[in-house]
Amino acid sequence: MPRAISTSEPIPRAVLLATVTPADAAAERQAARALRRLGALGLLTPFADDALSLHRLLAAFVRQQPAPSEVLCTTATALANYSQALQDSGQIKQSLSLVPHLESVLAYQAEALGAEHPETLGTANNLATTLSSQGDYARARARFMAVLEARTRTLGAEHPETLRTRHNLACALSDEGDHYYALLQYLLVWEARTRTLGADHPETLRTACNLALVQMQQGNYSAAHARFEAVLAIQTRLLGAEHPETLLTAMGLAETLYFQGNYANARARYEAVLAIQTRTLGADHPKTLVVAHNLASMLRDQGDYAGACSRYETVLAIQTRTLGPEHPNTLTTAHNLALTLEYIGRWQAAYLLYTQAVTNSGRHLGTAHPDTVQYLVALSKNQGMRGYQRAARGLLKTWLRQMPEEEEIWLKRMPEGTRRSAIQIILFLARAQAVVTALLLAWVAGGLANYTGGGLPLQAFVVCIAVLSYWSRPALIVLFALAGAALAAPVSSTLPMPWPWVGYACAALLAAGIVPYGWPAFTWLLSVTRVRLLIQPLQRRIRHLGQRAAAWSQAANLED
């Protein structure tokens, strides 16, 4: 049992058996018998996912054993291979248990071999890749940058290992949302690989595909479309139409068509890619789930909300089981499912999903992460639209209190204070909306005294209710009811008794229902009548302008 492995964490059985030397069938059988004997003695305890937990006495003994360099290399290789196997099979959540062991091996290698030894740097790169696959982009970025600096200094800027590290760094930056810096890194790798390997080399084509993906994420759709088509033509000719790299490029092209508004062509490409990946990778593979998620978004934008919800729910269930509820992909699916549920009027179900997304994203990605902010704003909007205005404002105020000043610049993604200022503006607008609503409804409801004879007491009551409506949802409902009765008073007051009071009561009930049900009913009508589809071009244009503004902001911040 290698000393380099962390003895304080459960150890996967496959990793222990992979470190056996010599690696032959007899040695593996002997190692398996030894593990069973240790388990019978109570020194090994079975853990979840076929892992083993060491007794404290056995752990202390292992820590006292020497760790020769060949053992370190064997252990690092076993961990890297097992981690890659888990990622390839889509078991991202299980690879989380390997992080402490990779960190332990890295520490031993740095001490025994040196911090810049190729084996040490290889382990550091594998650790960064594992962290990135789990969505821990901040730690992955720091690891990749350290490895890149060391490999550039020891191997040269155009060495294959250096370029591979820079490419991995660019991938982590893109997943993190730092598209401008990722674009610069991809350009450096693409130019170097084109110069050293050729334009048609698979590594060069992979970089070109990722470069097009970043251009699409920046809103440069025309450039991304052209690059995707060029890469797809070469990959189809050299690798075949069902090669994983070809499918990845086809999916990128479909996504670009989707953002350009060419839904029919994009949907056809998505469905073709999904059918191939389901057949070759399996329905539960992360890459298959990404395509299924994108196809669900396509259905939603085409007005098929029931079909979109069904696909989102299927993808979310699989991602929660295989990736974990805190993985960025799982959070994105939960957010989009909640948005679709709002479209069909299921706002309470959407509220529960938004709450889970905010909690899990804040715990895993951090309070200042853009995704956390996006989910928080969506949750606040959901509550505000259902009349819980105080709770909606409370979410934003809590976020402003919890986010420390030094986190306003989150890995240089946005200019200083931009995200905090955005939340402050949203909070100010929410407060202003509550005040204006209260004043307007109080003014309307005050006219009820002229028809009912309530006089000054009724007007004072209206003022008190209007003040309370800023904090209290029941007071807001009462204020709407009074305003509704006041609007109906000119007609109801002309009727013989007791019909005026019947008219007041009916109008009050209808107006009171606006608070909990008004906005959900309005959004449902937009969906049912397909009016929402008519405003999508405007929404697409606004999103495009937002992407371009974000790209400009990142470029300006990096230059500073």
Image (cartoon, helix red, strand yellow):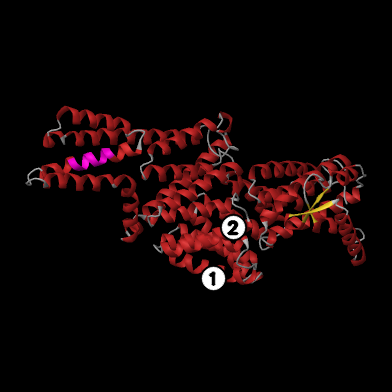
The residue carrying mark 1 is 272
| Direction from residue 296 to residue 62 in the image, left or right | right
* Relative image position of residue 20 (x, y in whole percent): 89, 58
Q: Which mark is residue 319?
A: 2
Nearest the eye: 526 or 359: 359
Q: Where is residue 458 shown, x and y percent of the image? A: 19, 31
- The answer to whether residue 156 shows anywhere in this view is no
Q: CA distance from mark 2 to mark 1?
A: 21 Å
The segment highlighted magenta reads: 478-485
Residue 553, relative to residue 332: is it above or below? Answer: above
The C terminus is located in which quarter?
top right
Q: Secondary structure at mark 1?
A: helix
Q: Position of residue 324 (x, y in %)?
A: 62, 53
The amino acid marked with disc number 2 is Gln
Residue 435, image quadrant: top left
The amino acid type, in three-letter code, at marker 1 is Ala
Residue 428 colored in magenta in the image: no
Q: Residue furthest front?
A: 498
Q: How many marks?
A: 2
